Image (cartoon, helix red, strand yellow):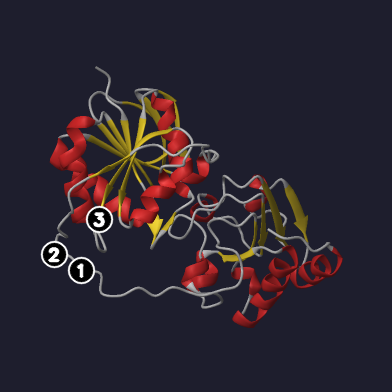
Amino acid sequence: MTQPTLILAAHESALLDASTARVVSAAQSFGQPVHVLVLGPAAVAAQASKLQGVARVLHAEVDGANAETVARVIADLSERYATVLAAHSMLARGALPRAAALSDAVYLSDVVAVPSARGVVRAMYAGSVLTTVQVVGRLFLTVRASAFEALAEATNAVDIETLPPVAKDERSTLVGREKASSERPDLSRARVVVAGGRGIGAAEHMKLVEALADRLGGAVGASRAAVDAGFAPNAVQVGQTGKVVAPDLYIAAGISGAIQHVAGIKDAKVIVAINKDADAPIFSLADVGLVGDLFEVLPALTARLPARIA
C-alpha cells in the first residue's frame, strides 16, 4: 500500500504561514495523498484543512514547540509516511534532521524542484549549483517555498485528526524573541522589494531606498554588506544568510551582486539593478540594468513612477 506525504505546517501564533500552501504544491509532486501536521492552536488546523490538495490534517496542541519536540512527534508518525516536507525555516531546519535520524530516513535541505517521485533538485554552494538527487527509502526534506506556486483555498474543509497532547521537550527553551515592527509589507511575502547595498554609503541614505519602496507599496531590503556596515538592520537582510525573497519586482540599488546575495533573489520575477559600475556582477542576473549614480536615479524613479500597492 502506498504511503501518503506529510507536511509540517508553518504558523505564527494562530495564523497559518503562506509558505505552507507552497509546500503543499511541492508535496503533490510525489504523487501521494498529502497530509498536514499542525503543532499549535486549533485555529491553525482549521486553516490548513481548507488548503487545496490536502487530504487530511493532523493536529496536536503544543505550547511553543521547539525543534526537539517537533522531531519527536514526526518520528512517532514517520512509519505512516514515505515522505515528510517542511518549508526551509529555522524550526524545520532544526527539527527534520533530528526526526530523520530518529526514523532512519534520508534528510535533504533547500529543495527547489521535485521532477520525479524519487528525485529532487536542491541548491548547493549558495545556489550557484543545482544538483539532482535520487533517493531510496524514506525521505525528509525542507523546500524553498518561494520556488513553488501556492495553491488556492479549497471549497470544502477536510477532516482533522486530533493527536494526543504533546509534552514539550525541555532540553532547549526559547528565552525571547525580538521582532521588528513596520507598516510596510513583510519582506518575505512582498510583491515589490527595494534593496540597498554597500553603495548606499551611509545609514541616512537608506531613506532613498525607503522612499522608493513606499512609493511602490513595497518592502525594504538590504545586502549583507549594507547590514554589516550598519546601514540597515539585520531583519531586512536578503541573501543566503538572510531572507530568501521571490517578489514580482526586485530593485537592487548599489548592490554588486555577490553570490550569497544572488542566492536570495534568484526567484524574483523581474530584477532591476542600479549601479554606477557597469561591470558589477548583478547586471548578469538583472532583467533590467541601469548604469548610473543611485543618488540621482532613486529620487528620479520615486518622483516619476506611479504609486502602486504591493
Q: Answer yes or no: is residue 190 visible.
A: yes
Image mark count: 3
Helix, strand or loop for disc 1: loop
Residue at mark 2: 170
Amino acid on which disc 2 is placed: Glu
Instruction: Report the quarter where the N terminus lies.
Output: top left
Give the side of residue 288 with respect to residue 114, left or right. Answer: right
The residue sitting at the bottom extreme is 204
Decide which of tag 2 and tag 3 comes sooner along the chain.
3
Crowd rating for badge 2 (residues with CA inside 10 Å; few <14, some 14–19, many 20+) = few
Horizontal side of residue 21 vs 60, given as left or right: right
Work out how far the residue at label 1 is from the one at label 3, CA to CA, in angstroms: 17 Å
Residue of label 1: 173
Q: Considering the numbered disc 3 on the image, is that residue within a helix, a strand or a loop?
A: loop
Res 168 → quadrant: bottom left
Closer to the camera in the image, 240 or 165: 165
- What is the CA distance from the residue labelled 1 to the residue labelled 2? 6 Å
Relative vertical location of residue 113 with respect to residue 44 in this rendering, above or below:
above
Callout 2 secondary element: loop
Q: Which residue corresponds to mark 3?
A: 61
Of marks 1 and 3, which one's residue comes earlier in the chain? Answer: 3
Q: Nearer the viewer, mark 1 or mark 3?
A: 3
Residue 127 showing in the rendered view: no
Task: Say if 4 sits above or below 309 in the image.
Answer: above
Q: Is 249 above or below relative to 179? A: above
> Residue 40: image x %, image y %?
30, 56
Label 2 to label 3, Cα distance in Å? Answer: 16 Å
Query: x and y percent of residue 155 in the render?
Result: 53, 37
For badge 1, the amino acid type reads Thr
